[in-house]
Image: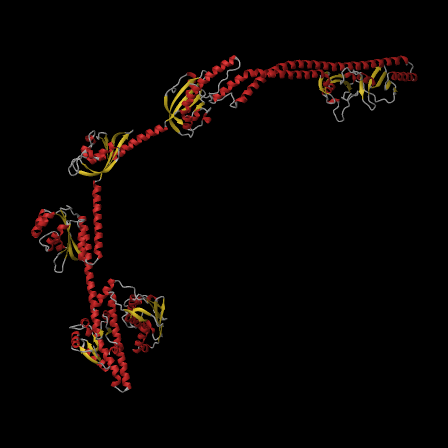
Amino acid sequence: MTTVARTLLLVDDDPDIRETLAEFLGYEGYAVTTAGNGREALDQLREGLRPCAVLLDLMMPVMDGFQFLELRQQDAELAAVPVIVISAGSQALKSLSGVELFPKPLDVDRLLAALARYC
Amino acid sequence: MMPFRRTPSSISSGGAGRSLNSFRAQLTILIVGLVLAVAGTLGWLAYDAARDGIEQDALHLVGTAADAREFALVSLLERQQVRAQNFLRTIQIACQPSGAERAACMRKLLADFAATDRLRAARLRVEGLESPVAVGAALPPAAVAKERQLAWLQSGQDGGGYWMFAAQEDLRLELFYGLDYVEQIFRGDRGLGRSGEVFLADDQGVFVTRPRHSVPAGASNGIDAEPMRLCLAGGNGEMRAADYRGVEVIHGFRHIPAFGGACIMAHVEIAEAFAPIDALQRQSMLAAVAFAGIAALAAAALARRFTRPIDKLTQRVRALQKGDFDTPVPREGPAELRLFAASFEHMARSLRESEMRNQAVLHNALDAVVGMDAEGRVSDWNAQAEAIFGWKRAEALGQPMHTLIIPPRYRERHVRGLERFLSSGEQTVLNRRIEITALHRSGEEFPVELTVTPLWAGDTHFFYAFVRDLSEVKRVQAERSRLERWSMTVNNNATSALFLMDVRQHCTYMNPAAEKMTGFTLAEVQGRPLHEFIHYLHPDGRPYPIQDCPIDRALPQKNQERGEDVFIHKDGSFYNVAFSASPIVEEGVPVGTVIEVRDITAEKRQQQEREHAQEQQRFLVEASTLLAETLDFEGTLNKVAHLAVPRVADLCSVRVLETDGSLPPLAVAYASSNKEAWVEELLRDLAPDPKLAFGAAETLRTGAPQLIPEVSEPMRQALIRAYPALEPAVTELGLVSIMSVPMKASGRLLGVISLVATNASKRRFDEADLAFAEEFARRCAAAVENARLFKQVQEGVRLRDEFLSIASHELKTPLTPLQLQVQTILRRAAQLTRDDEARQWLEQRLATLQRQGERLNRLVDELLDISRLARGHLQLNLEAVELAEVVDEVVATLQSQGEMERRGAQVSVSIDAGIVGRWDRLRLEQVIINLLTNALKYGEGSPVSITGRVREGEAILTVADKGIGISEAYQQRIFERFERAASATHYSGLGLGLYIVHQVISALGGTIGVQSSPGQGATFTVTLPLSGPAAVPEAERGSTQEGAERL
């Protein structure tokens, strides 16, 4: 599967975070698509969106991050898209494997460094 | 009887040989002595007579010699006197002319006279003429004429002489002779043998004639001799005495008054005088010795002939004395001795038998035997006498008996009694058995039994006393009667019942305690089978055959039987007893049984009560243990209810009051497990009926415990009326006794426990059981309450953690856009304004904003960590982490945030490269951030140094500052929650940093410590094993997993 360089899918139910982070990453040269929950994100991906990485919040209504990761794992094509988890409950992140974890509030320098590896 | 051993008297106790010799010698000496005595006496008499004769002869001889000289001397002097008278007459006649012629005539005649008579000197005086006519050379001084004296001696230089005086008419003639005439008389043959001598001594005892022997110079002269003294005193006589030389002589002496008191001494030496008799004596002695020798030989021969057989008999006697009866008696010597020996041997044999009998009797006699002679002295004293009186035989023999063994107050009576018997034959004590008091050597008196037997030995009485010490007998009697009294007292006062049975098992005795216990009197049962009165039934009514009775078995089996059984009282009631039946066996034959019985009904009951109480106590302990085991009180109460059945009740139900006021049974246990479900089913839906005035309903209403010792029929009816469904149960189980007790905690009723006794045990509860049940309920209530409280607490904790978790999430969520905005503005600041000053101003404000955002974030993290740590839910994400990297990162971050700059502190880092451990990166970061910010915060601008080393598989990290330091009292507490050493007013923070650090390091298997003193700064030292924490147990991992999922 091919991804589009420097495009990101940001999944977070908090609109402020969505907008602020999208704006911040926009300034850093990323094209950011957003989704309010796991379901929306999944839909966008299934519709053909291919970001170079997904920034995923965990605690979300409709479909949370855990469910999203589970479903993504079932689809071989989607599973190839790298996911970076961003969450306020930093401890919970450690139970996840195969994804990079960034606690909220975000250490933007590290985040940018991580994104640079994927995109 | 014969005295068995006489005291040795005249016969020496020495050896037989010596006595034998002694006897023979005595006999020999006796014979020889007799012969010698006779011969000697005769010889002596003859000798003495001869000697007397010789002495008489000698005396006569010297007397004759002395007389002869006296006669001659006096004759000489008288002749010279006559001649002088004749001369004077011649003068008268021849010389008549007067004048000168006469003088010349006288002178011529005088000279003639002097010459013829060999005068030494002569003097003639004429009265009226002045000068005497004298012839002779030197005239001695005129001597004084003495009365009736013919002449008198005058000693002189020339050897002396003697004067003589004669007178006629007017003429006086004095004549002086030398001693020549005198000496002629004393010279020549003296008729006195070889040693004989006669001499003359003057009235002073001085020798006049020369003695035959010279007188040794210095020796006494003649006057010292006794005869001389007698003579000078005027005596005449003969005698034995020493002469002037000291030689023994026989003297004859004559005093001669006519010759001026001179003495004639004649003597002959005794040696010479007795020479013949002495020769005779020597010969006699020789003859006597020879005679004696012959006599001795003859005597010895004679003695031999008679003494040998006698000696042998003597030996035999000695042997007999020593108790040797085996030496044969020789039959030798003269016929009389042989006859004597034969008789003696016969006697000895009899004596031997008698002696043996006596010895045996006396020495083995159980009685003391004391022999006494007529004088009251001890003559015999056997071994038993030694034993009972304390005196040895040797000490006792010969002693007055009464001083030894009769107490002083009886002695006089004894002595008088003995005297009376000896004088008149009257007696009161002889040959009778009497009891008296005797005296021991120690002075102690003791009772004895005594028989005195008098014996008449032909010339004297002696007595034998047979004495038996009664002390022991008396003591035993006293002891026996004391024991009898005691045993009566014991029997009568014993609390145990005592029975005696004969061989037929018939009662022969019961003590008062036995009468009291059985209800029967001794008279009622005496002589009758005891079993049929007190032991004929079992408590269940079955007959108790005597064959089965262990008590009645004791005698035939000759065994002591012990055990417990049940007896029947006269009133028909049963009582528990403990018995001990012992056979009485006399000389192997069983004669009866003694039975000791104790009523143990009360003991049994007490024991049961004790066991019951102990059982209840054990039950409470077990129940408490169960209740304390878990907080699942529902399950536990069920277990406890089953524990109570059937130990304390047959049915146990535990009901817990629900919030809606209902009281459902939480646990039901019944003694019969197959009916338990049925009973539980019946009870489940029963609501307590307030109309029922007893049981659980009443307890629910009043909160007070209920005891129904015995369920009455009306109660049973009421119960069925209230709960018709219970009827089958009530009927089938048969309610006997009920207790219902409240479970209360903090004064609040939590539930009711019912304990029911049914027909299964027929138990009747009492107050003690109720107290136990209340205690049981209290413990159950405490368990229920504890579980409730714990549930509440758990719930609270869960809610808090949930809240914290949500709260931190919610708190962090707005932080994220805030921070992102700050970052965005910061990054855009340069684009937003070209004014450097404005940009700087903006950047500074934004940096503060970001730092405060970070801080807020950390505080929220800490709160979350605390919540996790409290539940042990700290999760570690272990991976290979390099220490230097983490430290550098942390320092860089703080640097970038301007922490050091703000605090004005230098941070020096010295971490060895390549320290890689299996740690949690984020947690390690957290630790280092905490320690570093702590050092910066409390370092007050002092330089902070961080070092890292490896030692023995552990990374050692130190963070040191030079700030205010930490007092020792706080050094441990700073690692506790909400603790800090500095005052809260000066230093902000929750005080959780070091606590979290400590917990994280502990979770990583490491340690943390601090070295500090106030004002000297602090050095925190962290050790972390490179291999990471030890394996975490499965359960714990599960719980952390669970904790993680909750977020």
Residue B462 visible, this orientation: no
Which image quadrant is residue B365 in?
A: top left
Q: Which residue is drawn at 25% across and 85% down?
A: B831
Which quadrant of the figure has residue B419?
top left
Above or below A89: residue B149: above
Q: In this view, does B150 lie above or below B616?
A: above
The correct choice, above or below, for B970 with respect to B274 in the image is below
Q: Position of residue B965 (x, y in %)?
A: 35, 70
- Residue B620 visible somewhere in the drawing: yes
Residue B548 image offset from top left, x and y in percent: 20, 35
| In front of the other: B1004 or B606 | B1004
- Name the colouring of the figure: secondary structure
Seen as rendered, the residue at the extreme right is B101
* Residue nearest the viewer, comparing B371 with B119: B371
Judge left or right: residue B155 versus residue B417.
Answer: right
The quarter of the rendered structure image containing the C terminus of chain B is bottom left
Classify residue B910 as left or right of residue B327.
left
Q: Where is residue B262 in the image (x, y as percent from the top left)?
A: 77, 18
Q: Is residue B218 above or below residue A1?
A: above
Q: Nearer the viewer, residue B358 or B987?
A: B358
**Figure quadrant of the N terminus of chain B:** top left
Q: Which residue lies furthest to the front in this view?
A: A1
Task: Say which of B758 and B571 sits in front.
Answer: B758
Q: In this view, does B349 lie to the left or right of B222?
A: left
Question: Residue B170: x, y in percent?
Answer: 86, 15
Residue B479 location, quadrant: top left
How many numbered discs sit on the rendered protein?
A: 0
